[in-house]
Amino acid sequence: MKAVYFAWVRERIGKAEEELDPPNNVSTVGDLIAWMSTRGEGYAYAFEKASIIRAAIDRSHVKHDAKIAGAREVAFFPPMTGG
Amino acid sequence: MQAEIFDAAEEARNLVAGRTDLGAVVSFVGLCRDEGAGLAALEIEHYPGMAEAEIARVVMEAEARWRGVRATAIHRYGSFAPGEPIVLVVTAAAHRGEAFAAAEMLMDYLKTRAPFWKRVRYLDGSQGGWVEAKSHDDNSAARWDAGASKK
């Protein structure tokens, strides 16, 4: 699946998007965050306060307990500050 | 969603064009604001694809909540000097109460759901970092959520 990052999540990870191939035991967005946090310093920094990270699957907001099976694009970003 | 400036009056005219049953139009424009710290610009990043979809969902929710309300919302992205317009919400309804309420709900939802992020740049060239989300914006948006008392 494709992962996309925005704002300081993107800056901390050091890239805007990448292909992810998580292991089979990663089934939810929260699992994915925990798994990614182990992939390096930038990821650990981006997800250090995992509970505030917002996520979207295929461009719709989801909670951390959402299943990632079948997702084409998973997005991670800070709380939004538009308007 | 666009980089270009919008014309609030034109959007309002389009919203009510050909209609004779609408008695109220409310336009809200959100501007880039300098809080006195020497702001050069707000830079707004967005999630292409999702930003359009989320704005459309928010407009649909407002139109579904108040029967007969029509709404338009435009959010810009890019770099904005203090005083420049960033966001536009226009609502039209038979009566002013629904038009005002729908405009307020749209803005509350846009601020908390539409995938846009503001970053500060100061006049001395330094980066001020990402603007932090405010909990009172979440509280304002929660007023309209399912289960919350309806007007």
Image: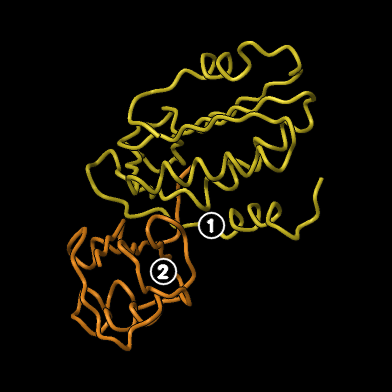
Chain colours: A orange, B yellow
Q: Secondary structure at mark 2?
A: loop
Dot 1 alpha-carbon crowd within 10 angstroms: few under 14, some 14 to 19, many 20 or more: few
Residue located at (61% from left, 12% from top): B17
Q: Which residue is mark 1?
A: B134
Where residue B117 appears, as percent x and y from the top left, is 38, 50
Q: Nearer the viewer, residue B84 or B39?
A: B84
Q: Secondary structure at mark 1?
A: loop
Q: Is B18 placed left or right of B77 in the picture?
A: right
Q: Which residue is mark 2?
A: A53
**Contact, mark 1 vs mark 2 (Cβ under 8 Å):** no
Where residue B58 appears, as percent x and y from the top left, is 56, 44
- Say how many tags the image has: 2
- Chain letter of mark 2 equals A
Cα separation between marks 1 and 2 = 15 Å
Q: Is residue B89 above or below residue A52?
A: above
Image quadrant in which the N terminus of chain B is located: top left
